[in-house]
Image (cartoon, rainbow, N blue to C red):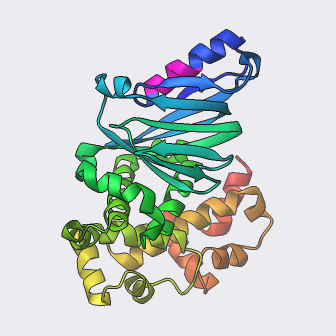
Amino acid sequence: MLLLDTAGMTPDERIDGFRAAMGQASVPCRIEHLGPARDVAARMHLWQFGPANLFTADATGFRLVRTARHVRMEAPLVVALAVQPHGRGRFSQFGADHLVGPGDLMLSDLTAPYVFSWTGTGGSRAFQVPYEALGLPVDVVRAAGPRLRASPVHGLVQAHLRRMARSAAELADDAGAAALGTATVELVRALVVSAAADERRGRPVLAETLVSRVLAYARLHLTDPSLGPARLAAAHHVSVRKLYQECAAAGISLEQWIIDQRLELARAQLVAPLGRRRTIAAVARSCGFTDPSHFARRFRDAYGTTPREWRDAAGGA
């Protein structure tokens, strides 16, 4: 959902619109624009994913200040895990200052005061999770904030969130949006617990989130032909048998799931401008299939048409 696009607004409308959109998407705070009113520009979206949401913002420089007075106002109890796609931000909470560069993850506890800002232009992609859905106490979240990079799942969650943000509009309209949101909450929970080094919760949470972490890892490596149960098990420090058991309990046939995901990737690539200039065999290989004939059979079984027929039909539409 588009919350704000300042294009075509007057300076006064931009400032009022910015504050209204920020208030709708997040918790009470004060906004200070770091430049002339005439130069204020912003575009914001809010996408719902089950129990959580993804708030995206691209804007000229501003400072967001959440004070103790704001905290006392009625607002949802929320944790935000954000990735900075461009620009450089500065985040301060609990007496610690952090520089946030492109691609960096930032965990903020929105139940406490904090300050966040960037100069020039910047962007943020914030996955906002209610404490109730996260299922972790405040002290664990606060301990994790400065130590995100210490978590072994940091890179996985970072890549997942960046990929989710890039396709937010398409994903939010999909029938699986709520399930994706739930899985992403599980990934955030695993990141927080492991970063906080909370021995009481670490092992149980990592066990509970195994399937979500495995599927997120698999999505990032679909194009690698060597991706399979053995590699997934090794990457997550479990036996292949344990992996099969957990996937079966979740109602997932792992090999079929990987094939289905690769087929969906290939179906999209076949009709994309770049994919249309490549041979079908090349598209198949780029999506992790080593045998073009096997790919063609699987594609026909899944969609009732051959890869070439699918591409030709899309080209004539």
User: How far across and down, in percent of the image, does residue 256 sit?
Assistant: 40, 75
Q: Nearer the viewer, residue 284 or 52?
A: 52
Q: Is residue 49 visible?
A: no
Residue drawn at the location 28% of the way across and 56% of the way down: 140
User: How far across and down, in percent of the image, does residue 282 sit?
Assistant: 72, 77
> Relative to 100, is 317 on the left or the right?
right
User: How far across and down, in percent of the image, does residue 52 sit?
Assistant: 36, 43
Q: Nearer the viewer, residue 249 or 303?
A: 249
Name of the residue lying farthest toward the right? 277
Say which quarter of the image contains residue 201: bottom left
Q: Nearer the viewer, residue 23 or 264?
A: 23
Magenta stretch in the rendered image: 18-24
Question: Vertical placement of 32 versus 310: above or below?
Answer: above
> Relative to 312, is 258 on the left or the right?
left
Check if residue 22 falls in the magenta segment. Answer: yes
Residue drawn at the location 60% of the way across and 68% of the way down: 306
User: How far across and down, in percent of the image, does residue 219 sit?
Assistant: 50, 68
Q: Main secondary structure of the magenta part?
A: helix
> Relative to 114, is 17 on the left or the right?
right
